[in-house]
Image (cartoon, rainbow, N blue to C red):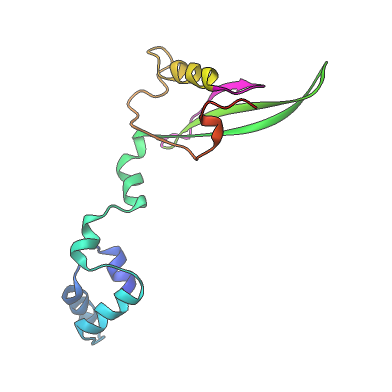
């Protein structure tokens, strides 16, 4: 209960948590509360309230976030089985998906062109977006495979 109170009320200090527990009929010393939080790796209230959690960041900026990733498909072509890489983007707030591009070979020039296409004034997929979430896939860099 102590940990839950501290996580849900990040500005609450040891004494505030102690008072809330007392209202529920649980008597604990503030040092005990401090030891419980320390044991769970939870910082004191001043430090805890200064940091933004990932969940808070997402809630505050939900309409400004686009996520990106790659997936591959195998296609049977006249020259045989060929692998294509597909770059896609998803608006987190609306779940709208845009295909950035499809290519059999990915390199820096292709990635640069995709960036131009998605940030132009016509498509406006990135309009009013500030954050792009992506993993550390080497395909985002200038490699050829």
96 sits to left or right of 124: right
Q: Give the mark count.
A: 0
Above or below: residue 46 compared with residue 71 = below
Identify which residue is drawn at 32% across, 46% down.
57
Quadrant housing the C terminus: top right
Q: Nearer the viewer, residue 103 or 139?
A: 139
Q: Locate residue 69: give its quadrant.
A: top right
Q: Nearer the viewer, residue 1 or 139?
A: 139
Magenta residue span: 93-107
Identify which residue is drawn at 22% across, 75% down.
17
Residue 61, position as x, y percentages in the image: 32, 40
Identify which residue is drawn at 36% across, 73% down.
40
Residue 82, position as x, y percentages in the image: 75, 24
Quadrant housing the N terminus: bottom left
Q: Locate residue 19: give its quadrant.
A: bottom left
Which residue is situated farthest in the top direction here?
122
Residue 55 visible in rendering: yes
Residue 89, position as x, y percentages in the image: 50, 30
Residue 139, position as x, y percentages in the image: 56, 31
Residue 24 visible in rendering: no
Above or below: residue 42 compared with residue 59 = below
- Residue 69 part of the magenta-drawn span: no
């Amino acid at each position: 209960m102590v940990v839950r109170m501290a996580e849900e009320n990040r500005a609450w200090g040891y004494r505030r948590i102690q008072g809330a527990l007392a209202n529920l009929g649980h008597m604990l010393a503030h040092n005990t509360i401090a030891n419980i939080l320390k044991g769970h790796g939870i910082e004191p209230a001043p430090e805890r309230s200064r940091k933004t959690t990932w969940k808070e960041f997402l809630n505050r900026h939900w309409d400004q976030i686009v996520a990106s990733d790659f997936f591959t498909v195998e296609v049977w072509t006249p020259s045989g089985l060929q692998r294509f890489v597909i770059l896609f983007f998803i608006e987190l707030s609306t779940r709208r998906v845009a295909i950035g591009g499809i290519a059999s070979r990915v390199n820096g020039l292709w990635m640069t062109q995709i960036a131009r296409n998605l940030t132009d004034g016509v498509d406006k997929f990135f309009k009013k977006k500030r954050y792009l979430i992506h993993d550390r896939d080497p395909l985002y860099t200038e490699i050829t495979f």
